[in-house]
Image (cartoon, helix red, strand yellow):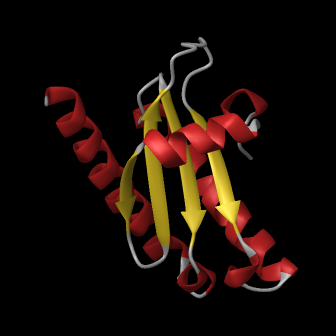
Amino acid sequence: MLSAAHRMRRAADFEQAVRRGARGGRDTLVVHLTTRTDHSPSGPVVGLVVSKAVGTAVTRNLVKRRLRELVRARLAAMPADAGIVVRALPPAATRPFDQLGADLDAALETAARRARRRTEA
């Protein structure tokens, strides 16, 4: 389970990450990564978006549980001021757990690389 201190809750936070953040995508998910300005000591915050296009309520909840666990395991490697939104796409419902984790790692790396490029320019 993802602790309350690391959960993104406000719609404005989701909107900021999606509109202003660097994006990294794979066929199963899209990651939006932004730098938060509030600098809370709790560390990175993560929001999940799993729409009805992914499947039934049971399928969506399964995808959310998997993504929460995958993100929780990677929190220590994320920057403390990161705001991250992970949006699941329909193929995420059929992807095995370990492959979904590999997709998440690749998407996070792509988003981080693009975010670094933005700050260097």
The one nearer the camera, 120 or 81, is: 120
Residue at the (71%, 64%) spot, across then down: 64
Q: Quadrant of residue 110?
A: bottom left
Q: Residue 27, position in %: x, y?
A: 42, 79
Q: Residue at 66% across / 32% down in the picture?
A: 6
Q: Position of 64 compared to 38: left or right?
A: right
- Residue 79: percent from the left, percent from the top? 41, 28
One can see residue 8 in this view: no
Residue 33 falls in image quadrant: top left
Residue 4 is situated, as x and y percent measured from the top left of the image, at 77, 32
Q: Quadrant of the C terminus?
A: top left
Of residues 112 and 19, the one nearer the viewer is: 19
Relative to residue 4, is residue 88 drawn left or right? left
Q: Residue furthest front?
A: 19
Q: Nearer the viewer, residue 39 or 2?
A: 39
Image quadrant where residue 48 sits: bottom right
Residue extending farthest left: 121
Q: Residue at x 46, y 50 (%)?
A: 32
**Camera-side residue of 106 and 30:** 30
Q: Relative to 119, is 39 above or below?
A: above
Residue 66 higher or lower than 78, as above or below: below
As drawn, which residue projects farthest toward the right? 57
**37 vs 106: above or below:** above
Question: How many labels sit on residues?
Answer: 0
Q: Position of residue 86 (x, y in %)?
A: 55, 56
- Residue occupying image coordinates x 76% and y 78%: 52
Say if residue 63 shows up in the picture. Answer: yes
